[in-house]
Amino acid sequence: MIAALVQLSVSDDPAANLPVTLDLVRAAAAGGAGFVLTPECTNILSSDRAHQQAALYLEETDPTLAALRAEAERLGIWLLIGSLALKTGDADGRFANRSFLIGPAGEIVARYDKIHMFDVDVSPTEKYRESDGYRPGSKAVLAQTPFARIGLSVCYDLRFPHLFRRLARGGAQILTVPAAFNDTTGAAHWESLLRARAIENGCFVLAPAQCGTHAAHAGRPRRTHGHSLAVAPWGEVLADAGMAPGVTLVDLDLRRVDEARARVPSLSHDREFTGP
């Protein structure tokens, strides 16, 4: 299976972002990819809640989701839409940060709502409160496909290894980590955390990312780290997309999952314990 990491640098305008995304998905399929992955916030990256309220849709009417489902069907590929920002109809008005696995008939095979919210103070001048605008999910999701069992996550989930352990013990062979990783924390931790999740679980980790400075009509522009990564179950970085939008192809041999787990069978060595 050839997989493709699509690296984007989206703005806060979903209508302008969509044709760029479609072009890169088509390029990935033309390169031979049967599994194409886009980053977190594929449709919009914005810190302005009022603008999001005006620009976003419910899942049922979202044009980005509809167009990408149709394109997956036309191309006959599996497509992970890393995540879309979507209205939910919740009473408190918060949105969902939702990942979708789309099958080659355009069907939604799995949905995953990001569990862990990025509520951090990166510096005195750079603060994030994702939970102000997004409601967290509460369910881990493992999807069965003809080529692999796939465990879904989104961005900040990466810092919570128990989620990935649960997915791996449930049978995941590939862990997906679509992201819009902050450029400061990304430079410090992104590669180390992705390699750790691959090594400790004996899984492939595929992490398509947003990159660069993101144009914003409302609110402050954001910067993201880029460097979409594919990591093998033994921890080797198979591909690094650098800092420019584009497509990165990687060949996945699922036998490497079994080989890594046979060499260090830690998944079968987990033990319950008490304390502290």
Image (cartoon, grey):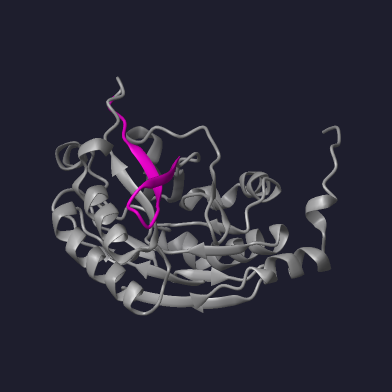
**Is residue 128 on the magenta stretch?**
no
Residue 66 point in image, percent of width and height: 23, 48
How many marks are shown on the rendered structure? 0
Q: Looking at the image, is 273 positioned above or below residue 66?
A: above
Residue 216 point in image, percent of width and height: 18, 56
Instruction: Specify the segment rendered in magenta.
Output: 93-112
Residue 169 point in image, percent of width and height: 71, 47
Residue at 18%, 53% (x, y): give it. Answer: 14
Residue 72 as seen in the image, left or right of residue 256:
left
Residue 236 as seen in the image, left or right of residue 58:
right
Residue 270 as seen in the image, left or right of residue 37:
right
Indicate the quadrant where residue 48 lies.
Answer: top left
Q: Looking at the image, is 67 positioned above or below residue 229?
A: above
Residue at 43%, 68% (x, y): give it. Answer: 34
Residue 174 point in image, percent of width and height: 58, 59
Considering depth in this image, is 29 or 232 the residue closer to the camera? 29
Q: Quadrant of the C terminus?
A: top right
**Is residue 111 on the magenta stretch?**
yes
Q: Is residue 241 visible?
A: no
Helix, strand or loop: magenta stretch: strand
Considering depth in this image, is 58 or 127 the residue closer to the camera? 58
Indicate the quadrant where residue 247 lies.
Answer: bottom left
Q: Is residue 105 visible?
A: yes
Considering depth in this image, is 170 or 47 the residue closer to the camera? 170
